Image (cartoon, rainbow, N blue to C red):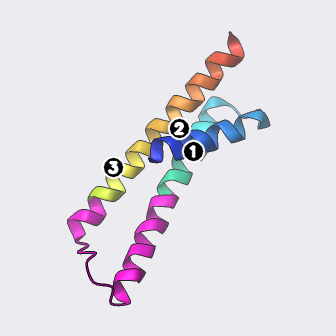
Amino acid sequence: NWVFLVAALVIFLAPAGLARWNLTLLGAGFGALAIVAWEGMEWIVQSMGTAGLQLTYDDTVSDLVLSTSGGIFGAILAARFLTNQVTA
């Protein structure tokens, strides 16, 4: 899911005329911040006493790693695709 979220952001930012590396870093940074915010919200909801979430440290770390990796991949993919479209 983060691949699509970050790719959409990179496509949205593309008309600004930023270099590919700028688009990639902005997308990857946004993806990393978004998953940290998501995990923070999960923690707040669990702290409020919500039953059934069963969130563990392993769940949190795996979510952070996988989502950040997906964000990086989505940013690279979208930036590369956009650069190829411009040069073609």
User: Which residue is under mark 3?
Assistant: 66
In this picture, residue 29 sits left or right of residue 64:
right
Badge 3 crowding class, 10 Å Cα cut-off, few under 14, some 14 to 19, many 20 or more, is few
Q: Position of residue 82 (x, y in %)?
A: 64, 25
Callout 1 secondary element: helix
Amino acid marked by disc 1: Gly
* Quarter of the figure that contains the C terminus: top right
Q: Amino acid at mark 3?
A: Leu
Q: Is residue 9 left or right of residue 58?
A: right
Circle 1 Cα neighbour tier, 10 Å, few/some/many (<14 / 14–19 / ≥20) = many
Q: Which mark is residue 75?
A: 2
Looking at the image, is 62 positioned above or below residue 25?
below
Q: Counting residues from the N terminus, which is met first, the one under dot 2 or under dot 1?
A: 1
Q: Is residue 3 left or right of residue 87?
A: left
What residue is rendered at 22% in x and 72% in y? 56
Q: Earlier in the sequence, mark 3 or mark 2?
A: 3
Q: Which residues are magenta?
A: 33-61
- CA–CA distance between discs 1 and 3? 15 Å
Residue 65: where, in percent of width, then height? 33, 52
- Mark 1 or 3, nearer chain start: 1
Q: According to the image, label 1 marks what residue?
A: 27
- Neighbor class of circle 2 (other Cα within 10 Å; few <14, some 14-19, many 20+) is many
